[in-house]
Amino acid sequence: MIASPQPYRMTPQEYLEWEPTQEIRYEYIDGEVFAMTGGSKPHNRIALNLASDLNTHLQDSSCEVYIADVKVKISSVRSYHYPDVVVTCDSR
């Protein structure tokens, strides 16, 4: 039986230093990195409509809506993602 090589695992700091030097975006989940795929036109339209509706709904609040290019850290599972749409009410 042939053993499968173990994937290289990065620390969060290694990922944060490495990822900006790449031609495509990667997400990080507990030491492993995953290449991001491109979205379809319908997928992008849905994300745009959702972001627009959320932005309108939250316009009188301190919350902000961001789309695909914002990296989000999820500390509880040691991960970084590029969600299609994200809402934050955190002033940081």
Image (cartoon, rainbow, N blue to C red):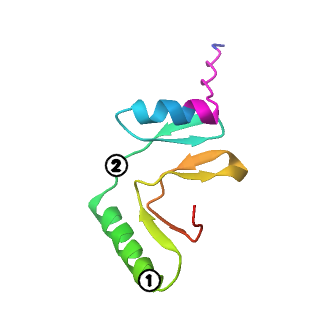
**Mark 1 or 2, closer to the camera:** 1
Amino acid type, residue under disc 1 in the picture = Gln
21 in magenta: no
Task: Give the numbered dot on residue 38.
Answer: 2
**Residue that lies at the very extreme toward the front in this rendered image:** 91
12 in magenta: yes
Q: Where is residue 20 in the image (x, y as percent from the top left)?
A: 43, 36
Q: Going 57% across and 66% down the picture, which residue do you hit?
A: 91
Task: State which quarter of the image contains the C terminus.
Answer: bottom right
Give the crowd class for mark 2: few <14, some 14-19, many >=20 residues within 10 Å.
few
In this view, 80 is above or below 64: above
Q: Give the range drawn in magenta.
A: 3-14
Q: Earlier in the sequence, mark 1 or mark 2?
A: 2
Q: 10 left or right of 54? A: right
Q: Is mark 1 on a helix, strand or loop?
A: loop
Identify the residue under disc 1: 59
Q: Going 48% across and 82% down the picture, which residue do you hit?
A: 58
**Residue that lies at the very extreme toward the left in this rendered image:** 41
In this view, 22 is above or below 47: above
In terms of depth relative to the viewer, which is nearer, 91 or 19? 91
